[in-house]
Amino acid sequence: MKNKLSTFIFLLLPLLIFSQEKGKIIPEYGETYEVVSPDFKTDIQNELKVVFDVGRTFKDSTKVNPLFNTAARYFNMHVDAGVAFENLQVALVVHGSAANDILNNKKYKAKYGMDNPNTGLISALSKKGVQIILCGQTAAHRNISKEDTLPEIKFALSAMTALVQLQNENYRLINF
C-alpha cells in the first residue's frame, strides 16, 4: 500500500508543480504553464515580434490546429510573465496543407462535413491584432479564393514573400 501511495504521489507531482492555466489575453485558447523562477529570464522591456510559419495541418480535422493555438499561447504566457501587451506583435503565415484550416465554414463543411473548429481562434487572434496571411501560391494551387476563407485572412503573393517582408520588419521566425 505504501508503495502504491508513493507511486501515486510521484505521478501527481508534476501536476502539482506545473498547473495549466488560462491566459489573460485569449482565455478561450492558448493555455500555458506557470514556470516559477526560470533561470533564463524573460525580457519584459523590449518588443517581441514573431512570425509563425504554419505550413501543415494535423490529421484530426475536428480540432483546432495546434500551430494556430501557439500564437494564443505566445500572447498569454508573455503577458502573464509581465510583458506589456503593446510590446507583442504576432503574425501567422499559412501555406501548404494548413490552408484548409482557414477555410470559411461553408467550404470547411463541404470538405470535412462540419464547421471549421479554427474559426473562433482565428477571430480571437485577429481581434488582438494578429496578422493571418495566406500564401497566394498555395491558394492558387489549392483553388482557394478570398471568398473561401475566413474574413480575417490576408492574401500575399507567397509565403516566402510574407516571411521575408515580416523578417525585414524585425519579426523573428518561429517554425515548427
Image (cartoon, rainbow, N blue to C red):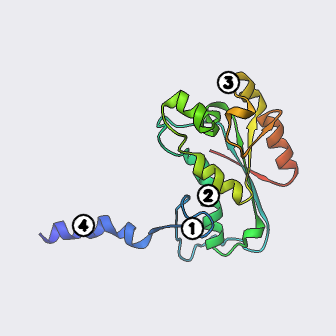
Instruction: List the residue tagged with mark 4.
Output: 8
- In the displayed structure image, the side of residue 176 where residue 63 appears, left or right: left
Label 1 – label 3 distance at C-alpha: 35 Å
Residue that appears at 77% across and 68% down: 87
Horizontal placement of 54 versus 14: left or right?
Answer: right
Picture coordinates of residue 86, whole percent (x, y): 77, 69
Residue 135, above or below 73: above
Position in image of residue 51 (x %, y %): 74, 50
SS at badge 3: loop
Q: Do the residues labelled 2 and 1 touch (CB within 8 Å)?
A: yes
Number of residues whose C-alpha sits closer than 10 Å to that of mark 4, classed few (under 14), some (14–19) or many (20 or more):
few
Q: Earlier in the sequence, mark 2 or mark 1?
A: 1
Q: Give, as a three-letter code, the residue at label 3.
A: Arg
Secondary structure found at label 1 = loop
Three-letter code for the amino acid on which mark 1 is drawn: Gly
Q: Are marks 2 and 3 in contact (CB under 8 Å)?
A: no
Quarter of the image where the C terminus is located: top right
The answer to which of 29 and 55 lies nearer the viewer is 29
Q: In terms of sequence position, does the residue under pointer 1 or pointer 3 come before the other?
A: 1
Q: Mark 2 points at which residue?
A: 72
Q: Which mark is residue 142?
A: 3
Q: Do the residues labelled 4 and 3 touch (CB within 8 Å)?
A: no
Residue reaching furthest to the left: 1
